[in-house]
Amino acid sequence: MTEPRTPSSPTASRDTSGGPAAAPANSAEHPWPVRSVSMKVAQWIDRLGGIWVEGQITQINLRPGTRTAFLVLRDPSADMSLSVTCDPDLIRNSPVALQEGSRVVVYGKLSFFTGRGTISLRVLEIRPVGIGELLARIERLKALLAAEGLFDPRLKRPIPFLPDTIGLITGRASAAERDVLSVARNRWPAVRFEIRNTAVQGPTAVAQMLTALAELDRHPAVEVIVLARGGGSVEDLLPFSDEALCRAIVTATTPIVSAIGHEPDNPLSDLVADLRAATPTDAAKRIVPDAAAELACIRELRDRTAAALRGWVDRETRALAQLRTRPVLADPLREIDRRREEVERLRTAAHRSAEQLIRTESTAARHLREKLTAVGPAATLARGYAVVQRVTGREREVVRSIEDAPAGSQLRIRVADGAVTAAALGTQALGAKHTDAGRN
């Protein structure tokens, strides 16, 4: 059967050569019957051939005595499912027991049932996805996220000391929810929670947790968000290693605490979260401070402060008492009196030293005066010597040689008690045997 074309006009096209008209086009006037559409869809699907499909079994319908088993295969990361049929022996003879929640890879061929208008996958082979393969996939995703730097400690946001409101994402009526709420309220009764109950395992868990995470991240009062779940198998904890959830945790603006499973469990959400808690109970302890412990700490700090203050006062009191017992503070004038006596003693000593110095210097001055007197001109004159000066007008010159006083010169002769005026009558050299020619 050939697929008719839809013309641009509602009327059927005709052969321009005048020949017979072509097949009528699909239109409101010429609709296709249901059987044609069903057969065309069946042909298109049949062309797909055999395919491998991975998914999670969410429903198994295996009735005794029937030759066909019915399953529902769901995508773990999206809310989509596919009906599957297979031989019951494929399920019974599987090397790993298949049950709801098992992840499998199947090989089969899609079929479109024209009578009911439904699509089903007829499976010829089923391969359970083992724990090793799941762990290998998680390790590959872990390496990818680590290469992108999503595990960098510098991206971790600090957890507030006492958050106003705590966002909690957990299963409905789960043990994890009870543990978080009871422990938190026992530690701080006024704590408030915004709880979002979601699936924590299975194909719809990731989508529901992403929605809840986005709601709590937008909530203005929520200051920290806790992802909490109890322990479980690797398959049960797979949603918490989902790439979409890990990236949503990193891009959130609110600090996120991952409290998944028990201490050995380590999904990828623990690595990208701002804080990893070993268990939901541990998460409550690390987020909510213990009121009793805080009060005890305050009392201890207050007691230590009071003790420190009392100790400081006691030390300062003892130091002050020691200062007061010192002589200078016990008798402040005593030092002044002692200094006054010392000043008086030093003044007396200085006076004596000055008098002694004066006496010594006076004696020395008298001795010098006597020496000067002895060698001075007056003493020489007193011993009979005289000073002869030639008077020339107002000038007087000491006569040192007979040549300085020729005959007729006016002389002034100074003796011890005065001066004599005389005139030179002549000169005579010492040792000469004749007198001067002008001598009388």
Image: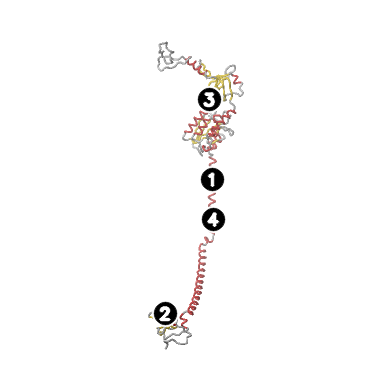
- Provide residue 337's location: percent of width, then percent of height: 51, 65
Residue 301: give its label.
Answer: 1
The residue wearing badge 3 is 75
Amino acid on which disc 3 is placed: Asp
* Among numbered discs 1 and 4, the one appearing first in the sequence: 1
Q: Which amino acid, mark 1? A: Leu
Q: Could you tell me how far apart the alpha carbons at marks 3 and 2 are, in whole angstroms?
A: 149 Å
Q: Circle 1 — which element?
A: helix
Q: Nearer the N terminus, badge 2 or badge 1? A: 1
User: Measured from the top left, where is residue 297 in percent x and y?
Assistant: 54, 43
> If you read the primary sequence from the N terminus, does the residue marked by circle 4 or circle 3 appear first?
3
The answer for how far apart the CA atoms under marks 3 and 1 are is 57 Å
Q: Which residue is mark 2?
A: 397
Can residue 77 be seen from the camera position used here?
yes
User: Mark 3 or mark 2, which is nearer to you?
Assistant: 2
Q: Percent x, y for residue 70?
A: 56, 19
Instruction: Count neighbours of disc 3 (C-alpha within 10 A) and say few if under 14, some if 14 to 19, many if 20 or more.
Output: some
- Sequence-wise first label, 3 or 2: 3
| Above or below: residue 223 compared with residue 353 | above
Q: Are marks 3 and 2 in contact (CB under 8 Å)?
A: no
Which one is in front, 92 or 319? 92
